[in-house]
Amino acid sequence: MERFRVVIVDDDDVSLENLDFSLRKDTRFQVEGVARNGKQGKKVITKVRPDLLFLDVEMPDMTGMELLQDIRDSISWNMKVVFYTAYDKYMIQAIRESAFDYLLKPFEEQDLQDILERFIRQKEADSRIVPYAGTPLHAGQTFIVFTPTNDMRALHPAEIGFFRYCSERKQWEVILSQQPPLVLRRGMTAEQIIQYSPCFVQIHQSYIINIDYLMIIKDSKCLLSTRWTNCSSRRNTKKNCKTDFACESSSVYTCR
């Protein structure tokens, strides 16, 4: 019987021990590492390569989101992240956009079991899926951006079509699948954005595309897959935020 590897990163001893005790009662999972701060957590995660990571949001040396950003380039396996946190549900909603799930402290046993069962179902579903041509090449890891009101938002490369710079506001915005565009905090630069994932490529001073969704370059225009055709209609009448974008063909390959 396959046992899934689990790592817990939490600076609170009581919370860590309670979760560890509950997980060890489920024979499908094996807790193979624990850490009590972010620095230790990065070492344990890299060593164990867990299938499931329970990660505290606030720790003395760094936040859980900062830890994920630090290790995202070294994660080459399929790891699901559950935020284990005492944050209120408003904050949780902001960070769960790309996390597999969250577990609120102090947790109820049923809440934990629901997460574990959903994890198993996801694993079973993944094993039946045959990748197709439209599957993103760069799965990537969750990264954190800030809105103009300093709210944190967790994003995943797969849900992003492109970034667009609006010169009127002097701000970048993210064009997301099935969601309104998300405006980023002023001061964000193109150089910072392309560091989030290798699939983000700057083709123009005002556009950074997700190259996983690039279908064709025709007449000096980059055409993305059809899922992004209508997702950016908001404000497309403004001259400095138009949705059509062009590039020199060579730019796609030299801007990496």
Image (spheres, rainbow, N blue to C red):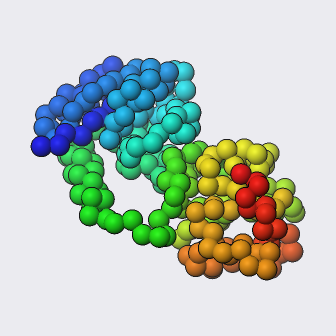
**Number of residue marks:** 0
Q: Is residue 52 above or below residue 225?
A: above
x, y (%) of residue 240?
86, 69
- Answer left or right for 186 relative to 7: right
Q: Which residue lies at the image location 54% right of the left edge and 21% below the top edge?
A: 61
Q: Is residue 3 above or below residue 245?
A: above
Q: Quadrant of residue 44?
A: top left
Q: Is residue 20 visible?
A: yes
Q: Which residue lies at the image location 58% right of the left edge and 79% below the top edge?
A: 226
x, y (%) of residue 177?
55, 68
Check the picture and name the quadrant holding the N terminus.
top left
x, y (%) of residue 23?
21, 34
x, y (%) of residue 203?
77, 61
Q: Is residue 205 above or below residue 8?
A: below
In this view of the protein, which residue sits in the foreground, 206 or 223?
Answer: 223
Q: Which residue lies at the image location 55% right of the left edge and 39% below the top edge?
A: 73
Q: Is residue 183 visible?
A: no
Q: Quadrant of residue 5?
A: top left
In this view of the protein, which residue sits in the foreground, 46 or 175?
Answer: 46
Q: Which residue lies at the image location 79% right of the left edge and 61% below the top edge?
A: 251
In this view of the protein, which residue sits in the foreground, 106 or 51?
Answer: 51
- Answer left or right for 77 relative to 4: right
- Answer left or right for 38 relative to 10: right
